[in-house]
Image (cartoon, rainbow, N blue to C red):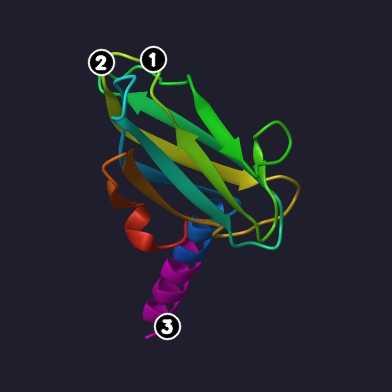
Amino acid sequence: MKFFKILLISCLMLIAAQSLAFAGSGKAIVPHWYVYNDGNTNIQTSNIFISNISKNDLIVKITLYNKDSTVYAANIDYHDFQNNNTEIGAGKSVNYKINANSIGTEDAYGYAVIEWSNKNDDNDTIGLVAWADWTTRGENKGYAVTVNNGMPF
């Protein structure tokens, strides 16, 4: 019986240590984004909406991967970010808008990775919640894109 108690306590401590190892940072994948601009009425954009649900400012990095696995970094609009678009304030929400690179027949699409970490010595276990969308101007079409199954990360 004593051996069983020691084994149980050891397992619980191992589980607790593993969960604490991930505190202070997080990551989620946006499974789809799409942009296109024909120079006329067919203008399609994507948005990623992110809310900081912690009581601390968080450092946030968003990386867009194009259909050919290259990083897509042009024509991004940052709304309500802090510190050169690298942070989200405590309790605040931001919009990361993805626009077409240029006018023409080439479309761009892929996925994105959202990563966050604590700015100071804070130790938040979760920090963000996010969702995304794709919309087309002129035709009023679009759809929502679930990020992390709607759960905080």
User: In the picture, residue 39 is in which quadrant?
Assistant: top left
Mark 3 sits on what residue?
Answer: 2
CB atoms at circles 1 and 2 under 8 Å apart?
Answer: yes
Q: What is the three-letter code of the residue carrying label 3?
A: Lys
The location of residue 104, given as percent across then percent down, is 29, 13
Question: Measuring 48% from the left and 50% from the top, which residue is drawn there?
Answer: 49
- Foreground tag (3 vs 2): 2
- Secondary structure type for disc 2: loop
The location of residue 30, given as percent across then percent down, is 35, 43
Does residue 138 appear left or right of residue 25 in this picture?
Answer: left
Which residue is nearer to you in this view: 20 or 93?
93
Q: What is the three-letter code of the residue carrying label 1?
A: Ser
Q: Residues within 10 Å of mark 2 (few under 14, many from 20)?
A: few
Question: Measuring 55% from the left and 32% from the top, which residue is drawn there?
Answer: 77
The magenta region covers 1-14
Magenta span includes 13 = yes
- Give the label on residue 102, or none: 1
Mark 2 sits on what residue?
Answer: 106
